[in-house]
Amino acid sequence: MAGKRPFGNPVPVSDLATEILDPVLRKRAGMSIGLVQSWEEIAGPRLASRSRPEKIQWPRRMHEDDPFEPAVLVIACEGVAALHLQHETGEIINRVNAFLGFNAIGRIRIVQKPVTADQGRPKPSLRPLTAAEKAKLSGAVGMIEDDGVRASLERLGATILGQKKV
């Protein structure tokens, strides 16, 4: 039965998907699913949101006696992320090699193309504040002397109050 181990303990669906996808990804792209899943830790959150590893291109070896040559990591990224990625290639190569456990990657090739990124939660729609809520909010922040801080706190309060249901 799918999802069951011999002792009857359920198995997470992600483990089953990894078991299915990992061999396919190894054959098609030359890398493991672990690299894709750990991309945010490897590249950092700023670059990971606008880039992703595409594949690892291993050089062909004509004979078994040929010396080992490091592979090329192909990374897909969007627009300005390519420039940031280019400046951090040395660091990313070191992090990927540390992740893989040996000096597998020698170069990075950057391919510019759209990368589907998680857009996060949509912004909630805010309701208009009542006159009583506006008066209470302006009274709460009225004693603050700095105009910028007062305006920021008014916007924050309006956002918080606007999210609440009446």
Image (tube, helix red, strand yellow):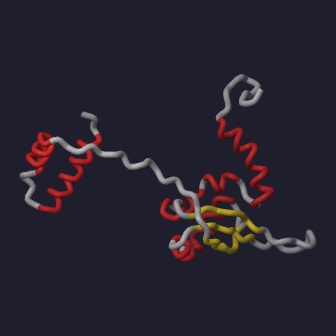
Q: x%, y% of residue 102?
A: 71, 63
| Position of the C terminus by quadrant | top left
Vertical arrangement, residue 143 with respect to residue 54, above or below: above
Q: x%, y% of residue 88?
A: 55, 73
Left or right of residue 154: residue 55 = right
Residue drawn at the location 65% of the way across and 56% of the way down: 35
Residue drawn at the location 46% of the way across and 50% of the way down: 120
Vertical arrangement, residue 63 with respect to residue 21, above or below: below
* Residue nearest the viewer, comparing 54 with 64: 54
Q: x%, y% of residue 16?
A: 71, 38
Q: x%, y% of residue 142?
A: 8, 51
| Position of the N terminus by quadrant | top right
> Which residue is outermost to the top?
8
Residue drawn at the location 70% of the way across and 44% of the way down: 18
Left or right of residue 157: residue 92 = right
Residue drawn at the location 91% of the way across and 73% of the way down: 62
* Residue nearest the viewer, comparing 32 with 156: 156
